[in-house]
Amino acid sequence: MLTSIFGIGNMRKLSLLVLILCILISVKNQNAEIKKSSSSSKTAVKWPYSSWDSFPSVFLSPLTSMEDDDGEVSWHSNRSLEYDFYRDSCPEAERIIRRVVHELYEVNSSVAPALLRLVFHDCFIEGCDASILLDAATGIDSEKDSPPNKNLKGFDIIDKIKSEIEMVCPGVVSCADIVALAGREGVVQAGGPFYPLYTGRRDAMHSFRDVATSELPSPNADLSETLASFASRGFDLRETVSLLGGHSIGVIHCKFFQNRLYNFGRTNKPDPSLDTGFLNLLRSRCNDRMNMAYEGPGVDFGTLYYRSLLQGKGILYSDQQLMAGIDTGIWVRAYASDISLFPRDFALAMMKLSNLRVLTGSKGQVRLHCSKVA
Ligand code: HEM
Ligand SMILES: *[C@@H]1O[C@H](CO)[C@@H](O)[C@H](O)[C@H]1NC(C)=O
Ligand SMILES: *[C@@H]1O[C@H](CO)[C@@H](O)[C@H](O)[C@H]1NC(C)=O
C-alpha cells in the first residue's frame, strides 16, 4: 500500500496519508489515556491543542493543498493566506481579539454562538470577506436584510474589536480576519476545539443580499438539499455532519420549527419524525425561543447535539434529517459516542469554512469601519 502511494509521487496523497496516520496515532494515544485515568477522562479526551504553538503542523496540510481534485480553487483558500499575517504590521491583533471575546463571554456567554454563526453566514455567501457586515447604502444591498440573516447577532462585538484594533494599528487588520478569528475564540470559550487560522483575508466592497437569500440553507431543507448546499462549497458528507454540530450552542426562535409542531407539510399534523415526548416538550417550552442545548449544557461541546439526533430530538428539521440517511447517520452515531472524534473533525471543518474563497493580495480592501466600505 505504501509503495503504491509513494509510487504515484503525489505530495497531496502523501500529506493526506500522514494526516490520517496522525489522527490514528492520536486516537490511540487518547484511548490509552482514557484507560490510564478514568476519573479525569473527560479532560484527557479533549482535542488536545489549545494554541498554535502546540498544534502539529501536519494538521495544516489541508490548508496548503486545498484545491479540488481537478485543481479548482475558487471555493478554497489559495495559499495566499499566511501564518500570522499581521506579525509585523499589527502583532497585537490576535491577542486583542482573544481578550475582547474572553471578556465579553465572561459576562454574556451568548457572544460565543453569535460569533460562530457569523462566521458561517459570512463564509458561506461569496466567501469569508466580511460582506455580511456591510450596512445597506447606495449600491450596497446588505446581506443583513436577507431573511435568513434577520436574527444574526454579534455585529456590535466585531465593531468593538475593530475599534480597539484601530487604536493600535489603524487601517491594517481586515474585518474578514476579525470575523474568522473572533468566531474561533467564541468556539474555544464555549468549550469547543481550538483550530489554527492563517490570516490575510481582505474585505469585500460588496454585499450579496440576494445570494444570501437564495443560498443560505433552510431549516426546512431535507437531507439531500442540505448536503447539496454544503457540497457546493466543497464540504463532503462527514464535514457537513460535523459543521452542523455548531448547533450545540445558542438559541433558536420557535418560528423556525413551529411548522413541525402543528402543521407539518400542510398535513395539519406534527412532523412524524418527532419523538412524541419531545414534541410535547417543544410545544410547552417554546414561546419565543429556546436554547439549542435545551437539556442544559452537555458534557462536551457537540456530544449532546448528536445524542439528541440519535433520540429523534433534533430541534430543526434540517438537523434531524441527518438521521434520514445511512451515511450521515453513521457520523452522527460516531460523534455521539466518541467524544474525541467530533472536536477533531469540527476543528478541521471550521478551518475549511474559515478559508472559503478569501480575498487576498490586492483584491478587496481593509475597511476602517466594518459596516462601511472604506
Ligand atoms: C443546514 C444548515 C443550517 C441551517 C438550516 C441553520 C439554521 C439555523 C437557524 C434557523 C438558527 C436559529 C436562529 C435564531 O433563531 O435566531 C440557527 C442558529 C445558529 N446556527 Fe445554524 N444553521 C445551519 C448551519 C450552521 C452551521 C454550519 C453553523 C456553524 C458551524 C451554525 C451555527 C449556528 C449557531 C451558533 C446558532 C445560534 C446563534 C445564536 O444563538 O446567536 N449553523 N441556525
Ligand atoms: C448578550 O450577547 C448577545 C450576542 O451578542 C446579545 O444579542 C445580547 O443582547 C447580549 N445580552 C445582554 C444582556 O447584553
Ligand atoms: C488567490 O490569490 C491571488 C493573489 O493574491 C489572487 O489574485 C487570486 O484571485 C486569489 N484567488 C482566490 C480564489 O481567492
Image (tube, rainbow, N blue to C red):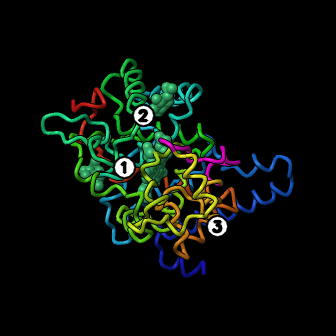
Q: Is residue 293 magenta?
A: yes
Residue corresponding to mark 2: 154
Density class for disc 3 (Cα within 10 Å; few <14, some 14-19, many ≥20) is some
Task: Identify the residue at the far left of this view.
Answer: 138
Q: Is residue 74 left or right of residue 236?
A: left
Q: CA distance from mark 3 to mark 2?
A: 32 Å
Residue 295: give x, y in percent of width and height.
Answer: 66, 48
Q: As shown in the figure, which amino acid type bears the numbered disc 2? A: Gly
Q: Is residue 268 visible?
A: yes
Residue 207: give x, y in percent of width and height.
Answer: 23, 43
Q: As shown in the figure, which amino acid type bears the numbered disc 3? A: Arg
Specify the quadrant of the image occupied by residue 68.
bottom left
- Disc 3, SS: helix
Residue corresponding to mark 1: 123
Figure quadrant of the C terminus: top left
Task: Identify the residue at the far top of this view.
Answer: 167
Q: What segment is highlighted magenta in the picture?
A: 287-303
Q: As shown in the figure, which amino acid type bears the numbered disc 1? A: Cys
- Disc 2, SS: loop
Q: Residue at x 40, y 19 (%)?
A: 168
Residue corresponding to mark 3: 333
Q: CA distance from mark 1 to mark 3?
A: 27 Å
Q: Residue at x 60, y 59 (%)?
A: 313
